[in-house]
């Protein structure tokens, strides 16, 4: 597909949304803002809320199981989750992404990670758990070094000439050598020193920190201090953060202070995964097309939710080209749904076209075109990325938001999203359950933007689940209340009691149109309350909409045809 090559470089550069999770019905103008950096106060508040909500299990996982291997972006995303179900899904995806063989039931990465934690606790503990020590930190990240030079009791140390030469006495210390650290460099040497003799070694960038005689006058002189070229006092005037003896030839490049600090920083950070780097990098593509969107959630099964994703674009933003009296525009549409940790769940890549004869072009140009894809998803939190590209001029529109797919419990009164529509009609039997805007045996086209005129009717579509059946009649008994509010003022109310459903049916579908002729222009809230009289429980759904005075240029939506 033509857009697929674009999507490979474009969608891979969309920022990971880690917070401000948008509700599916929100418009593009209200896209989530989680890419912004949280203030210190916000971070503290989120951590406090997280600790209160999760108790010990999830907090321990974050603080003790994966603190060294979880990226900042992943951690921020995890802290923003609102339910334990979402956290369980995140953890499952976290390990799956790191599994060398994602299709295997065994996860060798996860097994090795916990083996390293156990090893660190057994060998590096020193008043604190071994995993909390610097040696434990490095071991958990990079595994066993290729070589270890260990001096558990310190002793005599002959300095190499680049460290000044001569002999001294040291504290307990170790040097770890890694021939290769992925993404860092070859032949990495790390030193750990235990100046207190407590067994807790800390990592150091100063080769002289292990020298136990540094502050003892006249003791442990360097070669150059012995022959009088330098004095020991000069060590404390070093500008490189060390107290190494001076050398006539200067230090090697590997002894550079900033290089040592950069190396230590890289070694102690979580390893970078290529897909993570792509996922969290910031999009550099200009967003030239203004897209609006809406998302609804409707139950299919207890474990599957139908998620219709609707994208709208004004016809005026497309480039139409006229050929033999027909004005045509072509759009490439790419959708990608992925988990919080980047595992791709679904992708869709289609080309859609809008064709208008010359006689109708001026009529339809002020209107909009709508594209919809309905996707079945398991309950949980997902990332939605959409790229729409105009083939004629290359202009691109981008949507990046979150999908919070709800779980519909089997015995709890619940409802779908409240869909505000401009079209609700029966479909031919051959089209039942398939095609854009089709929900079961109805075509329900959402009004993106939720803006209507007084001359139109407000379409309402709502599914209510798990109505209780009467023990004797095996029928439901429900009551519906409709309210329209302007601010805190109720301006319209209606009630109805649906006809009893056939025996055994526990679902109610509300389909109706509300005339708006008497509603003054302004912003409103529609509330629908469904009460199950058998169970004595209610469920409420609300949606915001606006009303404008009729205008000849009102842009009614029209669906593009697949090409």
Image (cartoon, rainbow, N blue to C red):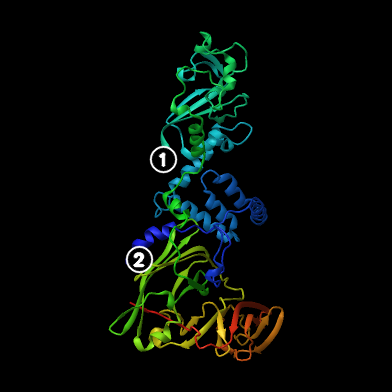
Q: Earlier in the sequence, mark 1 or mark 2?
A: 2
Asked if residue 504 shows in the view, the reply is no
Is 311 or 181 nearer to us in this picture? 311
Q: What element carries label 2?
A: helix
Image coordinates of residue 191 in percent, x first then y, are 51, 28
Residue appearing at x 59%, y 33% in the figure: 125
Position of 264 relative to 305 (above/below): above
Position of 164 relative to 430 (above/below): above
Name the image quarter holding residue 50: bottom right
Residue appearing at x 57%, y 63% in the figure: 21
Position of the C terminus, as image quadrant, is: bottom left
Position of the N terminus, as image quadrant, is: bottom left
CA distance for labels 1 and 2: 33 Å
Image coordinates of residue 562 in percent, x first then y, are 35, 77
Name the image quarter holding residue 136: top right
Number of numbered tags placed on the structure image: 2
Report whether 216 appears left or right of 372. Answer: right
Q: Mark 1 points at which residue?
A: 182
Image coordinates of residue 199 in percent, x first then y, are 60, 27
Name the image quarter holding residue 208: top right
Q: Mark 2 points at which residue?
A: 3
Is 480 or 212 nearer to us in this picture? 212
Categorize mark 1 by other alpha carbons within 10 Å: few (<14), some (14-19), many (20+).
Answer: few
Image coordinates of residue 500 in percent, x first then y, are 59, 89
Residue 256 numbered tag:
none
Residue appearing at x 67%, y 81% in the figure: 485
Q: What element carries label 1?
A: loop
Asked if residue 176 shows in the view, the reply is yes
């Amino acid at each position: 597909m033509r857009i697929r090559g674009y999507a490979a470089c474009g969608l891979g550069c969309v920022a990971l949304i880690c917070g401000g999770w948008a509700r599916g019905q929100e418009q593009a103008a209200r896209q989530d803002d989680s890419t912004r950096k949280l203030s210190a106060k916000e971070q503290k508040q989120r951590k406090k809320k997280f600790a209160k909500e999760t108790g010990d299990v999830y907090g321990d996982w974050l603080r003790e199981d994966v603190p060294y291997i979880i990226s900042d972006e992943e951690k921020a995303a995890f802290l923003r989750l609102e339910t334990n179900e979402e956290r369980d899904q995140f953890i499952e995806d976290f390990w799956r992404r790191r599994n060398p063989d994602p299709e295997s039931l065994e996860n060798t990465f996860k097994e090795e990670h916990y083996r390293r934690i156990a090893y660190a606790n057994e060998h590096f503990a020193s008043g604190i758990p071994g995993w909390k020590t610097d040696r434990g930190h490095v071991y958990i990240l990079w595994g066993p070094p290729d070589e270890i030079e260990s001096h558990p009791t310190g002793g005599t140390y002959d300095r190499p000439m680049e460290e000044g030469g001569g002999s001294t006495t040291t504290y307990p210390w170790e040097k770890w050598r890694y021939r290769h650290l992925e993404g860092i460099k070859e032949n990495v040497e790390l030193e750990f020193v235990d100046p207190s003799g407590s067994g807790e070694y800390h990592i150091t960038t100063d080769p002289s920190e292990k020298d136990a005689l540094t502050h003892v006058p006249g003791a442990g002189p360097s070669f150059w201090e012995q022959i009088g070229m330098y004095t020991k006092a000069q060590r404390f005037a070093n500008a490189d953060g060390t107290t190494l003896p001076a050398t006539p030839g200067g230090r090697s490049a590997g002894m550079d202070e900033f290089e040592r600090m950069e190396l230590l920083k890289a070694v102690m950070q979580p390893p970078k995964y290529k897909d993570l780097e792509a996922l969290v990098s910031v999009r550099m593509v200009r967003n030239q097309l203004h897209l609006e969107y809406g998302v609804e959630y409707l139950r299919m099964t207890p474990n599957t939710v139908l998620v219709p994703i609707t994208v709208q674009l004004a016809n005026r933003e497309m480039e139409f080209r006229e050929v033999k009296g027909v004005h045509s525009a072509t759009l490439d549409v790419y959708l990608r749904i992925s988990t919080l940790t980047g595992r791709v769940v679904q992708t869709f890549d289609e080309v859609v076209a809008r064709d208008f004869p010359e006689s109708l072009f001026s009529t339809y140009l002020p209107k909009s075109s709508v594209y919809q894809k309905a996707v079945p998803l398991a309950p949980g939190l997902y990332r939605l990325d959409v790229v729409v590209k105009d083939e004629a001029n290359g202009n691109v529109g981008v949507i990046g938001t979150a999908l919070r797919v709800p779980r519909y419990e089997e015995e709890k009164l619940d409802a779908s999203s409240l869909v505000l529509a401009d079209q609700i009609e029966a479909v031919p039997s051959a089209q039942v359950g398939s095609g854009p805007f089709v929900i079961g045996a109805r075509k329900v086209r959402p009004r993106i933007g939720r803006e209507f005129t007084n001359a139109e009717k407000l379409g309402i579509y709502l599914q209510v689940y798990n109505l209780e059946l009467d023990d004797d009649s095996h029928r439901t008994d429900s009551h519906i209340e409709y309210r329209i509010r302007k601010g805190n003022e109720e301006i319209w109310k209606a009630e109805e009691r649906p006809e009893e459903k056939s025996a055994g049916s526990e679902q109610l579908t509300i389909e109706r149109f509300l005339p708006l002729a008497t509603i003054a222009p302004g912003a409103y809230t529609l509330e629908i309350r469904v009460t199950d009289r058998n169970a004595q429980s209610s469920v409420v759904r609300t949606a915001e909409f606006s009303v404008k005075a009729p205008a000849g240029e009102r842009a009614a939506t029209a669906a593009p045809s697949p090409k």
